[in-house]
Amino acid sequence: MLSFRCLCILALQATPTPILPGPIPHESELTANARIEPGQAFGFFTDTTLCIGCKACEVACKEWNRLPADGFELTGQSYDNTGALSSTTWRHVAFVEQISTDGGERATTMQPFQSNWLMMSDVCKHCERAGCLDACPTGALFKTEFQTVVVQQDICNGCGYCVPACPFGVIELEVLADGRAHKCTLCYDRMKGGFEPACAKACPTNSIQFGNLTDLQERAARRVLDLQRQGVASAYLYGAPNPSPEPALRVPKPGVPDLSGRLPGDAPGSTGGIGDLHAFFLLTDRPEVYNLPTAPTLPASRVGPGLRRGLATLAGLAAAAALTFIIGGRD
Amino acid sequence: MYNRASADPDGKPWSERKRYLWWDADKQTWTGPDKPDFSPDTPPDKTPDWTKAPLYGMDAHDGKSPFMMSADGKAWLFVPSGLKDGPLPTHYEPVESPVKNPMYAQQDSPVAKKWERDDNLYHPVGDPRYPYIMTTYRLTEHHSGGIPTRMVATTAELQPEGFAEIPPELAREKGISTLDWVTISTARGVIETKALVTERLRPFEIDGRRIYQIGMPWHFGWKGYATGDIANVLSAVVGDPNTTIHEGKAFTCDLRKGRLSPTTAPGNERS
């Protein structure tokens, strides 16, 4: 008679090889149609016309990144009880109710593809030239091999210079636990393993799309033209080159069809030397409506003029003092 | 449309862009991202073999019929049997309504299941004590009965408290602002909750009268991180004739600014 232990061993031996012996190599190819390889730029294209406000991105982000819940208070701001991006909230779905027209009259029609209840999942923009990166004195912030911007908490000393340096108000110091700066990493750890970021994978409507930045920009430009053709004249890209509505201007380059007809960086959100945003958005109203700056600038771009102005003031005051001494000094 | 209905009678997708399931004539099988809910080798031109009658279940369906749950595989607009309120759809007012049925003398469904008792009173049509329409709905942030998500911190924080959505016109009339406490009552019960004034709720103009609608999400309660009073305290137990699902989408109620007082709800008071 077989002992219980023998039975267990036999049972184990009889177990067939698992179908999934471990993570699927290059899983992102299956889920996002993008192979993650170092040396290329990756990012998010967030199409607000597809957002249904389910907040699955917020939850997926918090679950993967082990971020704590940070408030159980009803804000009264439509269905947005998250409020803003913070050190513990790296995706934030904004809800904008636009039922009234400007005259205070209620709208009786709705835009195609989007009710007058706008929703947008906001995130770190992973700027081409990042203000936070410029400001970081310790090198804790760095550009990864995927052209994303990541904080290394073991190097960050919590000085907080990056916080006002971000033109979008994304990065924040965590005050309760470690005092260091935290923000979206574009799931650097997942990308290292060939997985698409958690928020994009969780998004049920593909409002958040992850991929190679060039691919995403091309896809986004196509989507804008599609929407415009279908009557959403207000659709445009924030942080990526906008397609020209004039087909003659959309001259295909060899290899990659260039739908933009405009220079890179020539878009709301990628102004002031910031360059293309690696997390960019398709919007249907002015950026301020979504709480995004229309023409953000890098604080570093104000250092030179500020310094020059300071030095000029100093020189002027010195000259004035000298003059006073020469003219009025003898009595 | 999904499954067999996503393809035309010949088995070709109605839309190439949204194709979901189609007939592969070479392999003599249905293929696509969806799994057929019928035998995958059923050709679109299949006709039931009535020489082998009686046929049961899907053996009696032809290859063009997408609705495997009905006897003939077709969707029905005229339903001669099976429905207690068939054979054709029509309009009845909800059991509780501020207005008379504009289409028929018959106010509400004659076959609705009713249990009118002292603890489940129904409001008469146009009852001035309960002038507002109440509708209830689920929130995306709540899974199932709300318990699985209200007990988990990262989902509870997305909708952390119960609320009632109120149109701005009604809110102005009652002096209610967003986040004020409001008390809502019916003949069945009374609850208190926070106000969320929103233009998403529009006043109705019915029969020359302006009628307001209030909305309240289901699935709050007093356990877990996200708490709030329960909409079902207000609703009436009225059953749909076919499924006995209770009529929680439309009933009437009253609204006032302020919190519950111990006298209006004995044992229900909170600080």
Image (cartoon, coloured by chain):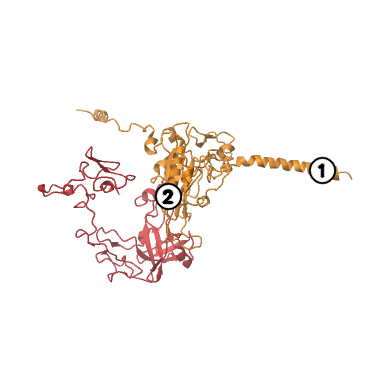
Task: Residue B248: give x, y in percent of width and height.
Answer: 33, 60
Q: Which mark is residue A229?
A: 2
Q: Residue at x 49, y 32 (%)?
A: A145
Give the foreground label among 2 and 1. Answer: 2
On the picture, is B213 further left or further right than A130? left
x, y percent for residue B28: 21, 39
Amino acid type for the residue under numbered disc 2: Arg
Residue under numbered circle 1: A323
Q: Earlier in the sequence, mark 2 or mark 1?
A: 2
Callouts 2 and 1 on one subunit: yes
Q: What colour is chain A?
A: orange
Mark 2 vs mark 1, CA separation in Å: 68 Å
- For the question of whether residue A89 can be seen, the reply is no
Q: Which chain is red?
A: B
* Disc 2: host chain: A
Q: Secondary structure at mark 1?
A: helix
